[in-house]
Amino acid sequence: MTTRELSYQADGREMIGSFYAPEGGGRHKAVLVCHEGTGLSDTTRDVAKRLAGLGYAAFALDFHGGGKPLPMDQLMSRAGELFGDSPRFRAIGKAGLDVLLAQPEVDSANVAVIGYCMGGALAFELAREGIDLKLAVGLHANLVTGMPAEKGAVKAKILALTGADDPIVDAAQRAAFEEEMRAAEVDWQSFVYGGAKHSFTNPNAGDMGHPGIAYDKKADARSWKAMMNAFDEAF
């Protein structure tokens, strides 16, 4: 497949994302992939590669800078800043989307955004912004926003994939998100996986040493299948 590292500016930082596309040229349906809160890692790159293997052009953006995970002593303050400033967070996401759309392999009329954890929150923020996307998917995504979707503004179909035992994205947060989607008249779906905790798609989730964060092989497989079904429908 075609691969390249792409450097760009956003939020006063040099971001370095990873782009993947099928060999052979032509334009492909495209996916913006947003990493977990810790930063861009091989886990996220592997998702983008997997999508390219299925025929999509995929760009794993960077929203911390340097194209690598953020040191833990900086993570909480950085995450708090972005979660507390929706316009700033959205601007970072839009910068990554612009990079994806600028690639010659991309069919700009057929674009989706997916994200994991904090990246899932970013995917939903881009959808709330009213950007012309076919689909926005959040996997164990934080669902809270400072700028709820306005009625009729969201063009993308929405898919939220969460764990029933996630202490970070709990039942109250899921209920509030669902009400937001209803009020904004969004085409949305939600799947909740029994027994799954936060970061259930990340095989390295246990390294965090948090009892509420754990990989779940079954939920990982089910959520991928649900996302692929949503891709088929949206595209």
Image (tube, helix red, strand yellow):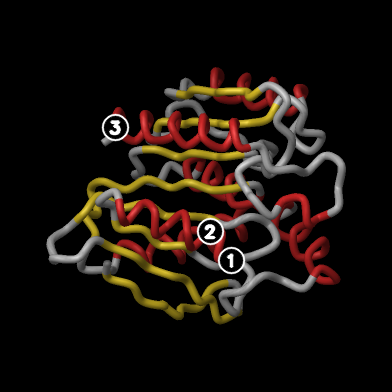
At 17% from the left edge and 58% from the top edge, which residue is drawn?
27
Estimate the x, y position of residue 36 in percent, counting from the top left: 63, 55
Pick the front one: 82 or 183: 82
Check if mark 1's residue and mark 2's residue have beta carbons within 8 Å: yes
Residue at x 55% of width, y 23% of height:
190
Name the spot of residue 51 as percent of width and height, x first: 36, 51
The amino acid pointed to by label 1 is: Leu
Contact between labelled residues 2 and 3, with CB atoms less than 8 Å apart? no
Disc 3/disc 1 C-alpha distance (Å): 26 Å
Left or right of 80, for residue 131: left
Element on which disc 3 rests: helix
Label ID, residue 53: none
Q: Looking at the picture, which amino acid does disc 2 mark?
A: Thr
Which residue was labeled with disc 3?
232
Residue 196: quarter of image = top right
Count numbered badges in the picture. 3
Q: Amino acid at mark 3?
A: Asp
Question: Which residue, given by chain and number where applicable, does mark 1 sit on?
Answer: 40
* Element type where label 2 sits in the image: helix
Q: What residue lies at 74% left-to-right and 35% top-to-bottom? A: 197
State the residue position of label 2.
44
Sequence order check: which comes first, mark 3 or mark 1? 1
> What residue is shown at x 23% (from left), y 48% (from top)?
109
Circles 3 and 1 in contact, beta carbons < 8 Å? no
- Residue 4 percent location from the top left of the image: 36, 76
CA–CA distance between discs 3 and 2? 21 Å
Q: Residues within 10 Å of mark 2 (few under 14, many from 20)?
A: many
Q: Residues within 10 Å of mark 1 (few under 14, many from 20)?
A: many
Identify which residue, 114 or 212, lies in the foreground.
Answer: 212
In whole angstroms, how far apart are the C-alphas of marks 1 and 2?
6 Å
